[in-house]
Image: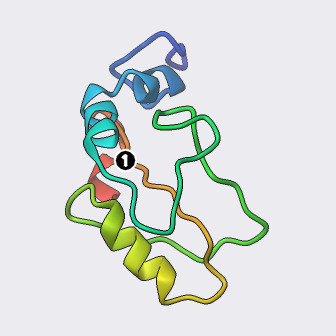
């Protein structure tokens, strides 16, 4: 039986929405110069969607400045998202 979306201990949308460590880091982070928050602001339901995908970069810490520096080096990059899986996710060790 697959885990339900109400199971916070699994790799589910609900576990992601309730990932308090990520919520706290996102709220404390500053917005880099030249960038703005996604339309819905800081939170786990806000994301930027573009016409192209430039790739991913693994970070050791939650740092929007590193993301902006990487984006600034690519003339086709105009936005970025920072994502982190909940620790209970099977993907946590690969991010």
Mark yes or no: residue 70 visible.
yes
Q: Where residue 24 appears, x then y in whole percent? A: 26, 32
Instruction: Give x and y (percent) for residue 63.
Output: 28, 60
Residue under the image location 42 percent in, 72 percent down: 68
3 vs 83: above or below: above
Report the colour scheme: rainbow
Number of numbered discs visible in the structure rendering: 1
**Residue 84, percent from left and from top:** 37, 47
Left or right of 61 in this view: 18? right
Q: Is residue 58 visible?
A: no
| Foreground residue among 75 and 51 | 75
The foreground one among 23 and 59 is: 23
Task: Report the residue that reaches farthest toward the left.
Answer: 60
Looking at the rendered image, the quarter that the N terminus falls into is top right
Q: Tag 1, which secondary structure? A: loop
Q: Which residue is outermost to the top?
A: 6
Q: Residue 58 in the image: x percent, y percent? A: 34, 68
In the image, 16: left or right of 94? right
Question: What residue is drawn where x is 64% and y is 41%?
Answer: 39
Q: Is residue 54 above or below residue 41?
A: below
The quadrant in which residue 52 appears is bottom right
Q: Which residue lies most toward the front here?
A: 33
The residue that label 1 is drawn on is 84
Direction from residue 31 to residue 21 in the image, left or right: left
Q: Residue at x 32, y 36 (%)?
A: 27
Which is nearer the eye, 68 or 62? 68
Q: Residue at x 51, y 63 (%)?
A: 35
Q: Is residue 61 left or right of residue 17?
A: left
Please tell me how crowded label 1 is: few (under 14), some (14-19), or many (20+) other residues with Cα within 10 Å.
some
Looking at the rendering, in which quadrant would you find the C terminus?
bottom left
């Amino acid at each position: 039986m697959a885990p339900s979306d109400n199971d916070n201990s699994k790799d589910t949308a609900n576990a992601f929405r309730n990932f308090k460590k990520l919520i706290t880091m996102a709220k404390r982070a500053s917005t880099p110069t030249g960038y703005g928050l996604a339309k819905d602001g800081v939170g786990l339901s806000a994301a930027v969607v573009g016409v192209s995908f430039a790739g991913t970069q693994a970070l050791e810490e939650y740092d929007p400045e590193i993301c902006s520096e990487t984006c600034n080096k690519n003339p086709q990059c105009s936005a970025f998202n920072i994502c982190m899986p909940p620790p209970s996710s099977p993907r946590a060790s690969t991010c």
